[in-house]
Image: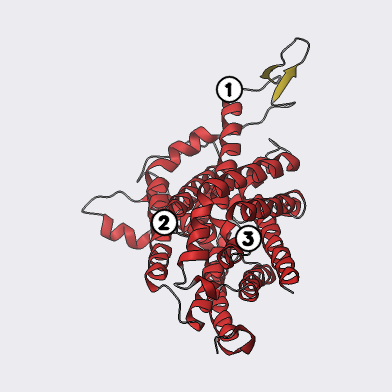
Amino acid sequence: MIEGLLLIGVLVAMFVGYNIGGSTTGPAFGPAVGAGTISKTVAAALMSLFFFLGAWTIGRRVVDTLGRELVTNPSVFTLPASITVLFFIGLALFVGNVFGVPASTSMTAVGAIAGLGLASNSLNWAVMGEIVTWWLVAPVVGFWVSAVIGRYFYATLNERVALVQSNGPLVTVDRSGIMPKIARGPGTTGRELVGTAVVVAIGCIMAFSSGTSNVANAIAPLVGSGALEMNPGILLACVAVGLGAFTIARRTLDTLGSDITSLPLTAAIVVATVSSLLVIGLSAIKIPASFVVIATMSIIGLGWGRATRTMRASRESISDQAGDARVTVGSLAADTEGEELPDIGEEDPEDIPAAADLFNPSTTARVILMQNVVPLISTIGAYLVFRFVPVFGFS
């Protein structure tokens, strides 16, 4: 009986990991694949490698938080309870896909485990409070860091990022000698080579950050129950993520995976870098973090900072101009990579598109709402199941 339940638990954990690989490969490597710099197969291989590195090094800290510290009595993580928690995480992925909104698996996982803790009177409120505090603080930090970049540095970055692709291969390999020699392809410029490397490197950072935070979503309940040891559990999750990256992720790579990768290249690099570094930092202090939520606020902050470049920060005019400035994420798309932008205060406000052109406030509201509602559903649903279904013994 126990072996059968363990097999079910492993299969559910692999299903969660499979979906994580499918949903996160697109946002990480969509720009690189879309620009033709790497193939889908290479993107999947890089996703698998850097997810593993993030999971093996930092991700185990988040597994400890979810599987061993969020509840004061680890014995409540029975095998049936662990499978139920994983079920709610998988349900969140399904609900997010139905509504076309990338739900936060980290927030949903915490919610499901918190529901178990509430039903069994073993929730560690100190750990829960710390997690929720960082959930509130991290998106605000992401917003303001991106806003500062958008106002003061975006124009310079945008001018330098121009990734003009030449015809033919990026690099060539000469195998005529004993040792292969790698050289620039015909027509490849140094700027193109550096730009391509930056785009691929950003994808690797995103994959690493996904490993630090998301591996816990697939295996923490089973590790907490003692059904799986930490190291085999991480390997199991990474294999599942790799399978997802090589299979269903090909669709997300076709559509570039998410709203982040449909931004101009400069904006995509800024948002991915800010969000990934915040997620890695939180994972290092054992806090499960949502890349999706932080990235959403980073996009909004970058757009706000970019839009306010039309204003000069002077005592005489700032109060008047602040009321006239159109603050919109759509302003990010007003620029073309490599375009030289005017100085702050010199831009014509008419050059900045209205929100309705590229940024639908109602859609954004739906995304933010669902990103918070889905974890709430997970928490309440898990609590009701664990509290009132007699098989778990908490009623």
Q: Is residue 135 above or below residue 261?
A: below
Q: Nearer the viewer, residue 251 or 60?
A: 60
Kind of element beneath mark 1? helix
Spatial distance from mark 2 to mark 3, Cα to Cα?
38 Å
Describe the colour scheme in one phrase: secondary structure
At label 3, which amino acid type do we have?
Leu
Q: Earlier in the sequence, mark 2 or mark 3?
A: 2
Q: Nearer the viewer, mark 3 or mark 1?
A: 3
Q: Is residue 197 above or below residue 91?
A: above
Labelled disc at residue 143: 2
At label 2, which amino acid type do we have?
Phe
Q: Is residue 70 above or below residue 144?
A: below
Q: Nearer the viewer, mark 2 or mark 3?
A: 3
- Give left or right: position of 344 versus 90: left
Q: Quadrant of the C terminus?
A: bottom right
Kind of element beneath mark 2? helix
- Give left or right: position of 359 versus 151: right
Q: Earlier in the sequence, mark 3 or mark 1?
A: 1
Q: Nearer the viewer, residue 163 or 209?
A: 209
Q: Nearer the viewer, residue 235 or 382?
A: 235
Q: Is residue 114 visible?
A: yes
Q: Position of residue 80 (x, y in %)?
A: 65, 76
> Which residue in the protein does label 3 denote?
228
Q: Residue at x 43, y 60 (%)?
A: 139
